[in-house]
Amino acid sequence: MGITLPDARELSDEVLQALRMRALQGCALGMKHGEVARMLGVARETVSRWWSAYKSNGLEGLPDDRTGRPVGSGRTLTDEQGRHIQQLIDEHSPEDLAIAAPLWSRRAVRDLIKKEYGISMAVRTVGQYLKRWGYTAKRPQRHARDQDPEEVREWLEETYPEIERRARAEEVEAPQASAAVVQPAESEVQSPPQDAGPSEDRVAVPQPEDTTAEAKPQDAEPSDESPAVPQPEKTEVQATPQDAEPSAGSVAVPQPTDTTAQVPPRDAEPSDGSHAVPQPPDTTTAAKQQDAEPSDDSPAVPQAEKTTAQARAKKGEILFGDETGVAADEHPRYGYARKGQRATMPVPDPHIRVNVLSTVSNEGTLRFMTYKGGLNAKRFIEFLRRLLRTTTRKIYLIVDQLRAHKAAAVKKWLSSRTDKIELHLAPRRSPELNPDEYLNNDLKGNVHAAGLPHNENELRSRVLAFLRKLYHTPGRIMSYFQHPCAQYAAGS
C-alpha cells in the first residue's frame, strides 16, 4: 500500500525549509529532479526552481517567504464584511432580517450577503465561508414562535429557584400509625385479574423488583386465575385487612421483612378494580406502637428504624408533569430502502391511541396513568388524588398551562390541600423546559421498536411495559434533566 504524503502547501515554514535543504542534497548527489520531487511530495518544477536558485546565488538565493497566492487573497468578502455577516447570523433569525427562510441555511446566508453588500455568490462558495467561519450543519432546536422570552427568564431566574428553595425548606411530619398493622380498604391490596388491562382513569403501577424476604402466610397459595405479585422493596408495604382471604382473581400481598406500614390518606379511596398504588422508596414510614399485638390473621410488622427515606421526608418533592398520546400507526424513526424506492410501514386500519399522564423528578421517580379520551379536570383531579397516595412529602407539581390544569374544579380541589400539594404553571409555549417532555419523546421513539401493534390491547400493553421499565431505571429518568434546556432543574 502506497504512502500518501501531506500537501506541501499545508506545511509550516520550518518544515518547508527543511524540504528545500533535502532537495538540494539529493540534487547534489546526482539524483534526478523528478525522483527528489516524488520522495519529498512536491512538484518537479519546484525542485528545479530551488536547484537553479541555489546554483546562481547559493543558500541565500532560496526563497524565504512562501510562494503562491497569499492566504485570503481573491476572496469575495473582506474580513470586516465576514465579521459583520457572522454577527448577524449569531444574533438574529432569518425572519428578523426579512430573509425568506425558517433557519440559517446556505441559501439564507447567500440572500443575506446579497441584501447587505449586493454581492451574488454561489451556494457552494457560501458553504466554504460558513465552514471557514466555524459553522456546522445541525438539527435545529425547536421553540414556539410566540414564546415570551421575559416569561422564560423570570421562570429560570426567579420562579423555579423559589419553588426549589421552598421544597428544600419544607418539613413534613410522618403520620403515626395507631396499630401494628394499618388496615386499608380491601380494594387497596387487590391485584386485578390476569386478563384485565388498565381501564379508563386507572393508574398503571409497576411492581418493584429485587424484593426482600417474603413473610407469606403458610397456607396462602395464589390461584391459577390470578397472577403472581412480586414483592415490594424494603421501603414499602401494603397490609391486608384482618380476616381477609384472597378471593378469585386477586392476590393477597404478604408483608416483606424490615419494613413499616404506609398510611394511605383518608380521602384517597380507589375505585373497585383499580390498580393498587405502591409506595416508592422516597416515602416516609409509620412506626407501630410498642404495646400493640398483631392479630393471628395478619403478619407482624417489625418496629421501624430511621431510614434514609425518613430523613429525606424533611423536604418537599418537585415533580414535572405532562400528558401525551401514543398512536398505533406512528413511529418517528427512519427506515432504509433501495435508491428510488420508498420505505413502507404497514399500519392497523383503525386509528388506535392510548393517552398517558405522567410525572418525573430529578431523583429518578416516575408515576403515570393511562386513560382514553382527552384530559379534563375530573381525570386530572383523579391523578392528583392518586399521586398523593405515593408519598407523605409535600408535592410541588409543575405542569404546562393546559385548560384542564387551570380549571375551577382543580383550583377548588387544591385549595383544601395546600399543605400536601401545590400546582405551578410553567411558562407558556415552553415545552423544552419540562423534563417530562423528554420522557414523552423517549416513549414515542421506542415503544414500537419491535413493530406496530395490531390492536388496542397490544398498544396499551407495550406502553405499560415501557413505562414499567422506566420505573425501574431511575438513571434514565434522571438523564432527561441533563438536556441543556432542562438542566436548570437537575438539582445538586
Image (cartoon, rainbow, N blue to C red):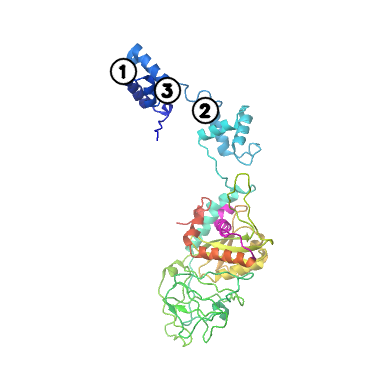
Q: CA distance from mark 3 to mark 2?
A: 32 Å
Residue 148 image position (x, y, % from top left): 62, 49
Kind of residue at badge 1: Ala
Q: Residue at 37% of width from left, 14% of height from top?
A: 53
Q: Which residue is mark 2?
A: 79
Residue 416 image position (x, y, % from top left): 60, 70
Q: Is residue 480 magenta?
A: no
Q: Which residue is mark 3?
A: 43
Badge 1: how crowded within 10 Å, few (<14), some, or many (20+)? few
Q: Quadrant of the C terminus?
A: bottom left
Q: Quadrant of residue 24?
A: top left
Disc 3 element: loop
Kind of residue at badge 3: Ala
Q: CA distance from mark 1 to mark 3?
A: 18 Å
Disc 2 element: helix
Q: Which residue is mark 1?
A: 28
Disc 1 element: helix
